Image: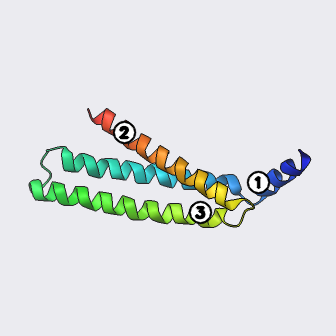
Amino acid sequence: MSKFWRKYLALLETDFTTQVFDNIKNLLVCALLFAAGTNALHGGHQLFMGMLASNLAGWGLIATSALLMLLSVSDGLRRLSRLPYHMAFQIILGLVYLVLAVRVVEIVWDFRA
């Protein structure tokens, strides 16, 4: 048990928790941007210059959030590759990212309704 505790303390010394929270924060922001983009596509409300601008804004937000999420996930997976048992950590992180992103989009859609 003390071996795991020492490894945990070593991770805390290297700002591991800060990096984890930054990655999760980035994931949530990307999910909110994606939800806003899909809301703009399916909302049916007119923005500034008509329907074309609403669709363009929606697709722009979706593309931006997808790019930012890809960068965030790849950064998180790259950082995890340095740890022992990195493959298990990477699979778990990928699943957590997917579940959190889908859930945040669902929550935003529910607030819209």
In percent of the image, x 53 and y 49: which residue is there?
95
Choose mark 1 or mark 2, whichever is in front. Answer: 2
In percent of the image, x 38 and y 60: which residue is there?
66
Position of residue 90 measured from the top left corner of the image (x, y, whole percent): 61, 58
Query: In this image, 53 relative to 97: left or right?
Result: left
Q: Amino acid at mark 3?
A: Leu
Position of residue 99 measured from the top left corner of the image (x, y, whole percent): 48, 44
Q: Amino acid at mark 2?
A: Glu
Disc 3 or 1, which lies upstream in sequence?
Answer: 1
For label 1, the SS is helix
For label 3, the SS is helix
Confirm or deny contact between disc 3 and disc 1 (CB under 8 A). Answer: no
Choose mark 3 or mark 1, whichever is in front. Answer: 3
Foreground residue among 96 and 25: 96
Marks 2 and 3 sit apart, C-alpha to C-alpha, by 25 Å
Residue position marked by numbered label 3 in the rendering: 77
Q: Which mark is residue 111?
A: none
Marks 1 and 2 sit apart, C-alpha to C-alpha, by 33 Å
Position of residue 79 measured from the top left corner of the image (x, y, whole percent): 64, 65
In percent of the image, x 91 and y 47: which residue is there?
2
Confirm or deny contact between disc 2 and disc 3 (CB under 8 A). Answer: no
Furthest residue to the left? 50
Q: Amino acid at mark 1?
A: Leu
Packing grade of label 2 (10 A; few <14, some 14-19, many >=20) is some
Residue position marked by numbered label 2 in the rendering: 106
Disc 2 or 3, which lies upstream in sequence?
Answer: 3
Q: Which mark is residue 12?
A: 1
Foreground residue among 47 and 107: 107
Confirm or deny contact between disc 1 and disc 2 (CB under 8 A). Answer: no
For label 2, the SS is helix
In percent of the image, x 30 and y 58: which residue is there?
61
Q: Quadrant of the N terminus?
A: top right
